[in-house]
Image: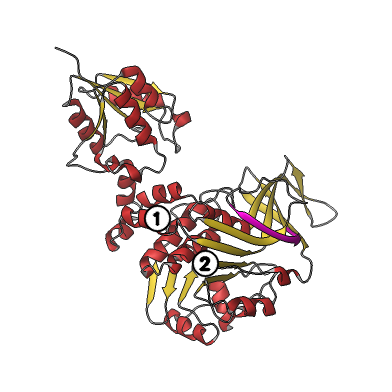
Amino acid sequence: MNEQIVLCHGCFDVLHTGHIYHLEKAKALGTKLIVSITHEDFAKRKLRFSAEIRKHALESLSFVDQVIVVRDRTAETAILEVKPSFYVKGKEYEELELDPSGDIYREKTAVESVGGQLVFTDDEIHFSATKLKASNGPFKDISEAYDFRLADILSFIHDVSELKVCVIGETIIDRWTPVTAEGVSNKSTCPTALVKGSSQDQLGGAYVIASHLAGFVKQLDLITPDFRSVCELPLDERIHHRFYTQGHIIKERLYDPNLNTKIFEVKRYHLPEGYENSIDLEDYDVVIIADFGHQMISRQCAARLSGLTHSFLAVMAQTNSSNLGFNRIDKYPQAHLYCIDTKEMMLCLNLNEPVNWEHHLKEIQKYISFDQLLVTRGTDGAFHYNGEAIHSFPALSAQIVDPIGAGDAFFSLAALAGYLNYPPEKTLLLGSLAGAMNTQWLCNKYSIEPGMLIESAKKVI
């Protein structure tokens, strides 16, 4: 009798009932079950257990005949070595297009090249480690309260793929200098710190909003000062840069990498006057204004931009330590969509703190005219208000590494959803997913990509 080899592959970090049921189903397809596991050095996420421990756990299952460790992200090398008759995956992988990495396509090609076939178990007990975390973690209520589907995320990615978008605003060079705090001098109250390495630059401000969007839309133009004389970082090739004059904003943060704590911040600005006169717009589907309040866009220019009629206009006007009270959202009298945080809303209403959100959201219509207003509230989530109904949505960040840039990421995808006139909950979901992802790394280290959005959505939906 010919041996029918069955191969299963994964991390199997926390072995659970779903894994066991899946492996039993797989074994029934052949005479020998081989399980390959990804070595922790090649895993997409940080694993709790080493390959040795995970291998031992799987070998304790009587129906598993062999366990091998693969020093590769995918099962391709294991497939080519084992040459299985069947390569078995769980039912959640059956819709191949939902795998943003494309790994499942490569594995399918590999198994067919050795004469085998890719099959999916029809699991009656159907959950993955990701779904296990979601069902017991902070996303449980979201999964139960909203009727979201991964198809909604795929539809969004498809719907925005042909859009022409223009982002207008200041590029901020975020410079991170690692230091170790030494103490306070005997002769003054000034703290001292020792520089422990070279500085690293990141492109933030309007630039990171453009980068977040560049992987989603057909055309992304960025109107911003030319900062290249003070920053050697490579430009995002997906962005069409419309530089008109030189200018830069550098925010240098001295931080302790051991404590992940910022100690001090230094700012350097150079924006020539009259820059706004260079802003001219072609026909775009969406125009996004990312005003960080460093005087790139004057009130006169803001009023002119607010008069756009041929494009969907989405506006944010950030309040920060450099412009507190001087960059209010009503600088832009009207827009299709605004995105502000709680402090920015309170400044516009001349209030110290929120008391009655329903009243505040109605009151702000005296200052700005809009179709959609988004209010981000940090760990308290976000509001969507269309002038009639208020919709709230919880924050999706279970753990936060750094909140810087989360609001910009939220605004990026929510603006596109607003253009598509998506239901409020879906707009809030897309923005919240992007914002939550951005809290998982330091400042603006990465940009949001379609594949990342799908992976993040799997934790919630």
**Going 38% across and 67% down the picture, which residue do you hit?**
422
* Residue range highlighted in magenta: 239-249
Which residue, given by chain and number where applicable, does mark 2 sit on?
A: 286
Q: Is residue 2 visible?
A: yes
**Going 24% across and 40% down the picture, which residue do you hit?**
91
Question: Could you say which quadrant of the image residue 45 lies in?
Answer: top left
Q: Is residue 138 visible?
A: no
**Going 35% across and 20% down the picture, which residue do you hit?**
80
Query: Relative to the observer, which residue lies in front, 9 or 104?
Result: 104
Q: Main secondary structure of the magenta part?
A: strand
Q: Is residue 82 magenta?
A: no
Q: Residue 39's spot in the image, x, y percent?
A: 43, 27
Q: Residue 56's spot in the image, x, y percent?
A: 33, 23
Q: Residue 247's spot in the image, x, y percent?
A: 76, 60
**Among numbered discs 1 and 2, the one appearing first in the sequence:** 1
Which residue, given by chain and number where applicable, does mark 1 sit on?
A: 158
